[in-house]
Image: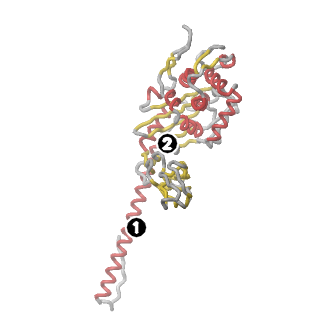
Amino acid sequence: MKYFIRWKKHVPKPAAVILVCLAVLTAVCIFAAAAQENAKKAEKEEAQQTIAAAEPSISAETAVLIDAVSGKVLYDRRMDAHMYPASTTKILTAMLAAEEADPEEIVTVSENAAGQEGSSIYLTAGEKITMKDLLYGMMLRSGNDAATAVAEAIAGDTETFAELMNERTASLGLKNSHFVNPSGLQDENHYSSAYDLAMITRQALQNDLFRKIVSSKTYQAERKGADAYKYFYNKNKTIFQYEGATGVKIGYTTAAGRCLVASAERNGTELIAVVLNDHDWFEDAYRLLDYGFEAFERVVIARAETPLISAVVMEGDSDTVKIGSDTDISCLEAEGEISDLSIIYDVPDAVKAPVSRWQTAGSMEIYSAGEYVCSKDLYYLEDIAAE
């Protein structure tokens, strides 16, 4: 690049020469800084284009890929569209049961449960079976009879249980789901979305019993009788085929098509992929998971019990109190891209003593490139006594 400076004939003075030299150096520095900034911008755009180009080609009508830790969306294809979820419905049914029921509870199977159409673990009316066996039969073999027996044991009937399902999704802030039965049998008023199913799964995986069930390859039930169906083999091939797979559930009806919610964990990162109405369901889910593991890296935002911010303490034996998280906080960012994270703290400027360690102090909202990622609760990290 050329730099042009107009000289005046009557300025051969040393001071003028120095001024001109300084001007030249300043101009060079300004242009060099601009060139460096443009180069950085070009590198960032190139990295973004490379990542965009790496996005998988899939055949699902709707799909989503999320970070199981933060809930951040990493891939989206019409993720909020209303879709028939088929047996992926059972993820919510199992989550409610894992949260509310005793796995050793003995359930007496009703005629209604035993008579359910579709996938079955061949329950008989009057049979007594543990809740745990029902949950394994529902999630590994996709038993509609097992799902109905679970719902009736918890809520008395499937209609009341469906109300619990809808209340639970509402509590998670999900707006594109409505359930009318615990199994996913076809009903035009029974629908969900790829995003809602991913977020339901994210919540469910926080329950140890649920996680153990959906990650199991086989299970032997404790059912009585020589002819009882006892050996359950997981229909979700993800568990057998994909490295690091942790679950979760397949589903199929003629109206819904092939549906799959798949999860996997590698190097401390767990991802959840959902593909709905997808003839290439397993391969497409694997492509999404591969993309997530290859194109994104985890960024630690805060460490557990490490101060993030402080508040003024009034009438205490200390003037301030430290505030932080009880767990590590992190999210996934595109590899090669400069992280553009921002945090908004919602905590009091001042608090009156006494203050107790692990008392809730407020929350933080995390944004990536201006897009909302998640919220996390914050706590006081020390005890402050009153004066």
Q: Which residue is mark 1?
A: 34
**Residue furthest bottom in the image:** 10
Is residue 199 visible in the rendered image? The answer is yes
Looking at the image, which is closer to me, 121 or 43? 121
Q: Position of residue 132 (x, y in %)?
A: 55, 23
Residue 166: name its quadrant. Answer: top right
Taking 169 as reference, is 130 above or below it?
above
The kind of secondary structure element at disc 1 is: helix
Q: Earlier in the sequence, mark 2 or mark 1?
A: 1
Q: Position of residue 163 (x, y in %)?
A: 69, 33
Is residue 280 visible in the rendered image? The answer is no
Q: Which residue is mark 2?
A: 69
| 93 sits to left or right of 306 | right
Other-residue count near label 1 (Cα within 10 Å), few / some / many at <14 / 14–19 / ≥20: few
Q: Image point 56% across, 39% down: which residue? A: 199
Looking at the image, which is closer to me, 236 or 252? 236
The kind of secondary structure element at disc 2 is: loop
The kind of residue tagged 1 is Ala
**Residue furthest left in the image:** 14
Discs 2/1, front: 2
The kind of residue tagged 2 is Val
Coloration mode? secondary structure
Q: Position of residue 259 (x, y in %)?
A: 57, 31
The residues tagged by marks 2 and 1 sit, at their Cα atoms, a distance apart of 39 Å
**Residue furthest front in the image:** 387
